[in-house]
Amino acid sequence: MFMTRAPSPSKSPLWSPTTKLVVGLTLVALAAGMLIVFRRYIAPLTVALVLAYLLYPPCRWVHTHLRLSWRATVGLVYLSFIALLTLIMVLLGLALVQQIQSLYQVLLRFFMQEVPRVAQNLSTSVYYLGPFRLDLTQYDWNALSQELLSSVQPLLGQVGVAVSVVATRTLALLGWLAFILLISYFLLAESSQGSMSWIPLNLLPHYGQELQRLMEELGRIWHTFLRGQFTAFLVMSVLASIVLTSLGVRYSLGLALLVGAARFLPYIGPMVVYIVISLVVLLQPTNFWALEPWKHALISIGVLVIIDQIYDNLVMPRFFGRVLGVHPAAVLLAAIMLTQLIGIIGFMLAAPVVASGKVILRYVVFKMFDLDPWQPPEALVETQPPQPWWRRTWERVKAQAEGWRRELSSSARGKEGGDL
């Protein structure tokens, strides 16, 4: 009987640095080419990933309390979500599309007809304020109006294309919606009930633990954003819809969506939405409160500003345990670039993309200089939310009054000592 010796397992040869560089550059080139060729799929895939991330907590809750299998839990949650989405589309879909179309027509008519007419009137107007004379004929208002139209027209064109797509390509939108739901379902169903990590980073040699830490830091950013901003979008849209409908403002549903979407772009977003609402109210001929247009606009904007401030200072700090730590100007630039790349989804995700880029850039720079990228963690340090302007003003007034009180007390004690 002959004994055969089992072949010893061969050790895989290591790649040389040149081979690693060539393979890495080839993968980067292939990834860039795929992004260019399949660019139209970036937005729906991003929406599918975000949807899976948002539906993960309810799936985990149902799995814990109903003791179902993970696939059965995901299927139950998705069926409930589809039923709720269908109900919303049936109840609000047609009315919302009609209001958005009418709102777009109003804005288009204002910029294309009203702005040139106002510019023509200003170019021939002279106003007297007491002893002062304001001559507007010396300015070329027609040229200014043309500059304004040239800057606004591309944006209105993009909005018009989006509105026409929503209104006419219903079957295409339903197909994309089914694609998003299917991809997000498989992403969530194939993940574990303990986490949503689809890449086993802990198995990578040397850098697995460090990359796991980096993914955790990025996960905190996206968890904070998705929990806070999307909650703010829903809450502010509902509140704005109730307020604008109660005040008798036309296109209240469409304007309410704009109020919610403005939460994704700090400072600039609310300002633009307030201007749009003011234009809509001023161009509205009548309202059931029998208010003059300027009073109606002032009340509508005032109520929305109050709600916005209350939500920012009382509600949002409960959702944002950590701030994203990015400058609003950087978010604005990122929103413009990402909107050009993947559309409205890029606009909504500009803030976490900038915050994630900041963390990754900091990690790379620290590693390039052989420093510890996690000490000190400046990008994710726990900070208190900024105080509202009225509280800061009150604190300054209170400090000034305290200073005056101390001066009066010291001067009174000095007089009493002199008398003694």
Image (cartoon, rainbow, N blue to C red):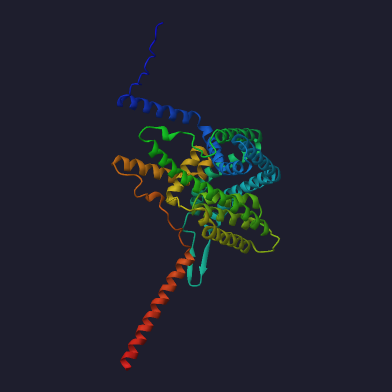
**Image location (x, y in percent) of residue 225:** 50, 48
**Image location (x, y in percent) of residue 371:** 30, 44
Q: Left or right? Give the position of 176 relative to 14.
A: right
How many marks do you count on the picture? 0
Q: Residue furthest top?
A: 1
Where 383 falls versus 16 (above or below)? below
- Front residue (pair 7, 58): 7
- Front residue (pair 8, 227): 8
- Front residue (pair 172, 56): 56
Q: Tell me where residue 281 sits by quadrant.
A: bottom right
Q: Left or right? Give the position of 136 relative to 410.
A: right
**Image location (x, y in percent) of residue 84:** 67, 43
| Quarter of the rendering occupied by the C terminus | bottom left
Q: Residue furthest front?
A: 1
Where 312 falls versus 19 (above or below)? below
Q: Residue furthest bottom?
A: 420
Q: Left or right? Give the position of 4 relative to 79.
A: left
- Residue at image point 59% right, 55% down: 277
- Residue at image point 57% right, 34% down: 189
Where 284 falls versus 414 (above or below)? above
Q: Tell me where residue 216 sits by quadrant.
A: top left
- Front residue (pair 161, 41): 41
| Quarter of the rendering occupied by the N terminus | top left
**Image location (x, y in percent) of residue 57:** 56, 44
